[in-house]
Image: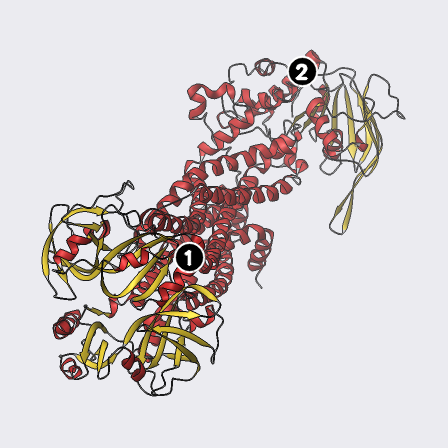
Amino acid sequence: MKALDKKLWRELWDMRMQALAIAMVIVSGVGIFIMSLSTLDSLYETRETYYRDHHFAHVFASLKRAPLSLVKRIEEIPGVDKVETRVVAYVNLDVEGFDDPVSGHILSLPDNSRGLLNQIYLREGRLPEPGRDNEIVLSEEFVQAHKLQPSDTISATINGRRKALTIVGVALSPEYIYQIAPGAMFPDPLRYGVLWIARQPLATAYDMEGAFNNVTLTLSRGTNEQTINEQDVIDRLDDILKDYGGIGTIARKDQFSNRFLTEELKQQRTIATIFPVIFFGVAAFLLNVVISRLIRLQREEVATLKAFGYSDLAVGMHFIKLVLLIVSLGVIIGIGAGIWMGKGMSNIYMVMYSLPYMIYVLKPQVIIAAALISMAVAVMGTLYAVYSAARLPPAQAMQPELPAKYHTTLAERMGLKRWLSQPTRMILRHVERRPLKSLMTTLGIAMACGIIMVSGFQEGSINYMVEMQYGLSQREDMIAIYTEPTSKRSLYSLQSLQGVEHAEGFRIVPAKLQFEHRFYRAAVNGIQPGGSLMRLLDTDLNIIELPKEGVVLTDYLAEMLHIKTGDMLTIEVLEGQRVTVQVPVVGTAKQYLGMNAYMRIEALNALLKEGYALTGALLSVDDIYQRDIYAELKEMPRVAGVVEHDSSIQSFYDTIAETILFFTFISTLLGSSIAFGVIYNSMRIALSERNRELASLRVLGFERSEVAYILLGEQALFTLIAIPLGFLIGYGLCAYMAFQFDSDLYRVPLVLGMNVYAFSALVVLLSSIVSAIMIWRNLAHLDMVAVLKSKE
Amino acid sequence: MIELQKATDHPLDENVVFHVHGVTKIYQMGEVQVRALRGIDLDLYKGEFTVLLGASGSGKSTLLNILGGLDSPTEGHVIYGDRDLTRASEKELTAYRRYHVGFVFQFYNLIPSLTALENIAVVTEIAQSPMQPEEALRMVDLGDRLHHFPAQLSGGEQQRVAIARAIAKNPDVLLCDEPTGALDSKTGIVVLQALQRVNQELGTTTAVITHNAGIAQMADRVIHLADGRISQVDVNETKLAPSQLSW
């Protein structure tokens, strides 16, 4: 080994704590970069593979009933490849020992087949025997949630008749990666499941022999990419199904499970871009500061080396090597950490989304990019310092640096001077002498504070959404969903059940809402005016009174359609007589979930040219009778399903608790590593820069604590300024993320509780305290003897 | 307030400020033992201006560091007044330096972020009965440069600020480590005049270490050190004024 390289290794060893602190920041940056991007790649890859291998359809349509002979017409639509028809029904389920309302979708399977399209992934067991009406394949999430296994039995109310069903297989489906009950806010595997059964018995039960009520199809290769063709297929299919009670054809991108997954991937992408930028930024700043300090301390050595005849390049390379060593250490550990976190994250998604497997994808270019970005940032950050050291003429470099120039600070000039002790003046003047460095240090700590806030924001937002949606707007305890529109009298039989305090009927019809050239498929909800269970709220949470005529839209829907109060909305009803009408928009309602249109129920029924009909009822019930009421509802043939919010919300919280904990853990780890990296390095550098000054004060009789005040007081000042600044940054980051997450599925409210602020401030303070303790121990070893004899 | 323990077994003549007895200092430098002091016996008297003269490596700095409470001897005792420095804790030594000793360094060691006046205030603020910082600066003829930062002062001026800082707390003893070492002779003489004036007007016991034999003639007593031992002690019957010195 060359002497210069030996020097390198020894110096690296001497500054190991500092090097480690820098490496930690790089570890975080590289780690989160790799975690985010590899999770993203893995999810995309897994989804694509799963969709491809299981023939996930491109177009989906539901209808009332059509004869199988219609298939030929559908197949003739240009661009259509494969067509599969099914019988699908929404049913009430019963699992022994579980009293809450449970519902599910039951789908027909062709004989001896996992399906032509949307093939199921059979995890366990076998397919139902053809023609057997008591054998089902059940979705894995549901099976796991209820701790069921093949050969266990559950029962379902199929078209009004209770039927015992034996589980013969456990499966997953590309169609139900995100399993969520219709109208529910969150996935709840305890209360919603998907069942597959042989076609013939299901068709018999629903009077669908030789018929179907659901059709999916794939597009021939080449047309998939061209949306114009896809839209053409959808339009033609809509046209064909119009006469058979079609309620609208949707493309894969609008398929519910796929939509949610796409939104989730979009969020991942946002995270994958913001965080690494912050981490690399902070790492670059730290490297710059540390290296320029290191080189300033080595002026004489650089000069000596040059006097011996080492070239500028050789001296420059010497320092670049030092930097690259530290960076490499960070990159290598970071890659390991990133893979570990990426796999952890991917597994969480696999479980969360009912994916049969997870293909962990780590693209070499991601690793290369992480390494190159880190190296480039580090080298750029140090190049200037190295350049100025290498270019100094040896004679000049051997001279001691002149005493640093200081000035009285602004605060002192403003007359605060007499209130400030000499040590305090030292702190302020030192801060003001290097404003950029002080600013960057503060900013670095603030960034750490902001990042930690991001983890806490999820929980607050979800709480607020739940409170808004279920505390203030939808206040029912239960929803009974009817099998088909039913007369108003049905409400009286519900009200007469013991324990039902109040019942309000509603009518929901699927419709295409259009304004100018923009349209959106949504449900038009007819609700009881002045009802106490379903209330629409404006931005200030005031209750909106629905007028006799006109429609109120979810605010986000109005924005999307560019429609204002007073404009005329075109409503094309997608069921019954399929009327198209124009209705004035009379207001917008603040809603965080879904997008809907609301009218008075009478007005909606009048539009539909039908009598007063309900598709379901909202119930408020006495807790004591809840179970009994549910049992009775299940026995009612016209009640297809019952939804209960409270238990679903609770179960949702339980499911996401782990995810939130993981996110909090990761971002706290990252935030505190930034905070520690910045604060420790900043203190360490301050200590080495002011070593002489502080040792002199010790000689003059200052206690260790008094000397520490000068050094740590400066950092405390940075930290105290950084925390409120960090709150601002954190707020901005959360706002940006909330904005990025907005979609027609949900809008994320920006709710940051005191606990979020307090937690991030606490983590930053703890990081400072840990750094301070480490520096405090260094202060014990100030060399007072050396200071008497040494030049600056 | 933390004070040094009384060394009752070493009653001192009340004119003796420091009683150094059998002091040995051995440094472990890697695998090599360096004997910096080899049995020093020495008394320094109240109000006395002493020069400790010796070449590099003679042990004079080590002796000064021990007297100043910056280092402790391997063997022997250093009695300050009626207290034993060699038995003092770190905290007690800090208090000793804080209240009793004034230091002047070869390279001034001013705080660059404080003005001349503030460099003195930083010490008077923690002292027991200090003089006014302005007064200290006037004693070293710097009454007009109160608000200058070190970077705006010449080397000689910086050293005079350092002397003002050392005397402002009214110390019992002033320890100066090569105070003219970084200065040219003309400026050095101005600095020495300041030291002499302080010694004469305030009666502060002053010990100056130097390798510069020229300075020796202004001292009451000159203690020669060589190889960690006192080789010779001279008493100057007639002292020279700093202005008469040359080197």
Viewer-closest of A388 and A561: A561
Give how far across and how far down residue A265 sits, in percent. Answer: 34, 63
Residue A203 visible in the displayed image: yes
Residue A41 visible in the displayed image: no
Element carrying mark 2: loop
Instruction: Identify the amino acid type marked 1.
Output: Gln
- Label 1 crowd (10 A; few <14 / some 14-19 / many >=20): many
* Circle nearer the viewer, 2 or 1: 1
- Label 2 crowd (10 A; few <14 / some 14-19 / many >=20): few
The residue to which callout 2 is attached is B129
Pick out the residue farthest to the right: B9
Tell me the distance, in whole angstroms, between the alpha carbons under discs 2 and 1. Answer: 84 Å
Element carrying mark 1: helix
Residue drawn at x 42%, y 60% is: A628
- Same subunit under labels 2 and 1? no
Relative vertical location of residue A383 with respect to residue A412 in this rendering, above or below: below
Instruction: Identify the amino acid type marked 2.
Output: Ser
Viewer-closest of B68 and A584: A584
Q: Quadrant of the N terminus of chain A?
A: bottom right
Left or right? Give the position of B246 relative to A153.
right
Q: Quadrant of residue B222?
A: top right
The residue to which callout 1 is attached is A626
Viewer-closest of A484 and A787: A484
Q: To which chain does the residue with label 1 belong?
A: A
